[in-house]
Amino acid sequence: MKVAIGCDHAGVELKEELLSLLKQMGIECEDFGTNSTQSVDYPDFGEKVSSAVSKGEVERGILICGTGIGMSIVANKFPNVRAALCNEPFSAKMSRLHNDANILVIGGRVTGKALAREITKLWLETSFEGGRHTRRIEKISQIEEKTKNL
């Protein structure tokens, strides 16, 4: 599995923690930045990761900003992206099981390092359940198509 990761200035420290986890798990990772705590605009980094996931250049993505809300909004603008903001393990697990989320979003200012590691590990190790959930994911894609020209 190849994972893209990106953050704004509020997520740099947590991004480094998660890069370490990914390395320990033997997961190939592409780091899209930022690498500084100097203020930047989260859409710039959310776009890079989300585009890579949308185009199939990577299997999954991880985005981090202060609350995770901004990155979630950016990511879900992209075709074929299902980004889930998860600041606790149950949501992370369910986002994979039922929603086949392909981008995990975490709030760097609201989620501690140990919890973020737990969330990320669980999210990466959980597979999509399929079944009735496949029909629902297909409906999301249909809505995406219908709304392109609004």
Image (cartoon, grey):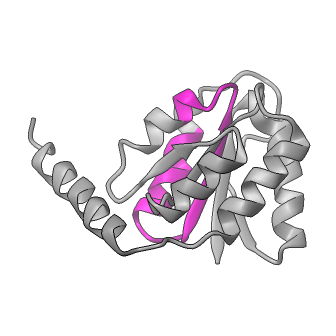
Q: Where is residue 50 in the image (x, y as percent from the top left)?
A: 49, 52
Question: On the image, which quarter does residue 39 sit in?
Answer: top right
Q: In this view, does 98 lie to the left or right of 107?
A: left
Q: Position of residue 119 (x, y in %)?
A: 74, 51
Asked if residue 67 lies in the magenta stretch, the reply is yes
Q: In this view, does 42 lie to the left or right of 55?
A: right
Q: In this view, does 136 lie to the left or right of 109?
A: left
The quarter of the picture where the C terminus appears is top left
Residue that sits furthest to the top in the current view: 39
Q: Does the image show residue 103?
A: yes
Residue that sits furthest to the front in the current view: 132
**Near-viewer residue (6 or 22):** 22
Q: Give the range drawn in magenta.
A: 45-71
User: Does residue 32 sit above or below 130 in this rendering?
Assistant: above
Residue occupying the point 60% across, 46% down: 91
Residue occupying the point 81% across, 53% down: 118
Question: On the image, which quarter does residue 136 sit in?
Answer: bottom left
User: Does residue 141 sit above or below 128 in this rendering?
Assistant: above
Q: Where is residue 35 in the image (x, y as percent from the top left)?
A: 80, 41
